[in-house]
Amino acid sequence: MLPSTHRPAYVEVSLDNLKHNLQSEIASVPKGTAVFAVVKANAYGHGLVRVAQAEVEYGASGLCVTTLDEALEIRNAGIKVPILVLSITPVQHAILAANNDISLTIGSLDWLEQAVKENVSDLKIHIGVDSGMGRIGFRNKADLIEACNYIKDNPDKFIPEGLFTHFATADNPDKTYFLKQVARFKELKSDLPLDFKYVHCANTATALWHQDLAINMVRFGIGLYGLNPSGTDIPEVPFELRPALSLHSELVFVKEIAKGEKVGYGATYTSDKSEWIGTVPIGYADGWLRRMQGYDVLINGQRCQIVGRICMDQFMVRLPKELPVGTKVTLIGKDGNEKITATDAAKYADTINYEILCCLTDRLPRIYK
């Protein structure tokens, strides 16, 4: 989908804040620890290629993505650092990954055997270990050792670059399950018949609050974009995170309605007095969720309530007075002394800040400053 460049609706990304967040994380981990910037899902809505370029410039040792397509888009942009695909890639694409120096996650001996039948060679792999996330990876030691021996017996086929797991509750104050996963990972990775360049279990939450588990690589995700991985402001982070994304538009239509008039699909809003109503050209097709009805935007440093249901391409807002067409509207970001964060919006929508960011579609152009 092409960005709507002839519509006053856009995402603004602060490169300075991306730099601050990444370099703060690099400074916080033990010396020699590789920090891979996680740029999956269009860099959490911030723009895949431009963010990847910036993070490499700012010191990232490598990049993590979810799909081979994301990795190829980065490679085609001329970025040379290591790239790890965190999800399982269909085995028939293994040669394509190897030819583009892209590392793949593997989680079964069967996948390895199929890759050999595909005649793959020199494929960099990271072995996924399921220590309790229940998603992908080896679940028992015997299967893991068997896979390691198979890799060892096929040195021209596979390059065992990494071993990793993912924690389900690293942001939870109750550490019971987290520590159970830590113990399970330590047991599974011990005494394996292979050596790995990278051993990693630290997502953003682990990297922030359990730095002793950095081992020799961390995967820095939501923190890179300036947001607390808990989805709230608790627990506090060990260094300042600066949100990198803001979302803006402007009023494209302004009118006065009388008391008792209705606004929007379903006629869910009725004015209780004469009011000025403005129309903003962003809707759920842009990722501003339909359930944001009743929430606020910022106009001229004031909070103004969204009235009526969010439409596919527009929504309406109650204004404090008549305002001119073209007045700036901030959905995420600062205006005067007021601020709305992705976390604030997520609380209202009963979701997490990750979803607010990732829902922002490609229809919105990204502007980098």
Image: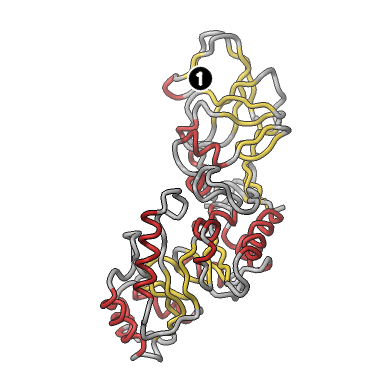
**Circle 1: element type:** strand
Q: What residue is drawn where x is 59% and y is 13%? A: 257
In the shown orientation, is residue 161 left or right of residue 27? left
Q: Amino acid at mark 1?
A: Val
**Which residue matches tag 1?**
263
Q: Quadrant of residue 15?
A: bottom right
- Using the image, determine if residue 104 lies above or below residue 330: below
Q: What residue is drawn where x is 68% and y is 52%? A: 14
How many numbered circles does the render carry? 1
- Using the image, determine if residue 102 lies above or below residue 212: below
In the shown orientation, is residue 366 left or right of residue 95? right
- The colour scheme used to paint the residues is secondary structure
Q: Give neighbour class at mark 1: few <14, some 14-19, many 20+ (Cα, 10 Å).
A: some
In depth, the one of 234 and 139 nearer the eye is 234
Q: What residue is drawn where x is 49% and y is 28%? A: 293
Q: Quadrant of residue 322?
A: top right
Q: Position of residue 327 (x, y in %)?
A: 71, 30
In depth, the one of 94 and 28 nearer the eye is 28
Q: Position of residue 18 (x, y in %)?
A: 65, 56
Q: Position of residue 72 (x, y in %)?
A: 51, 70
In the shown orientation, is residue 183 left or right of residue 345? left
- Using the image, determine if residue 51 lies above or below residue 138: above
In depth, the one of 14 and 11 nearer the eye is 14
In depth, the one of 210 and 108 nearer the eye is 210
Q: What residue is drawn where x is 35% and y is 86%? A: 119
In the shown orientation, is residue 6 left or right of residue 90? right
Q: Position of residue 271 (x, y in %)?
A: 53, 13
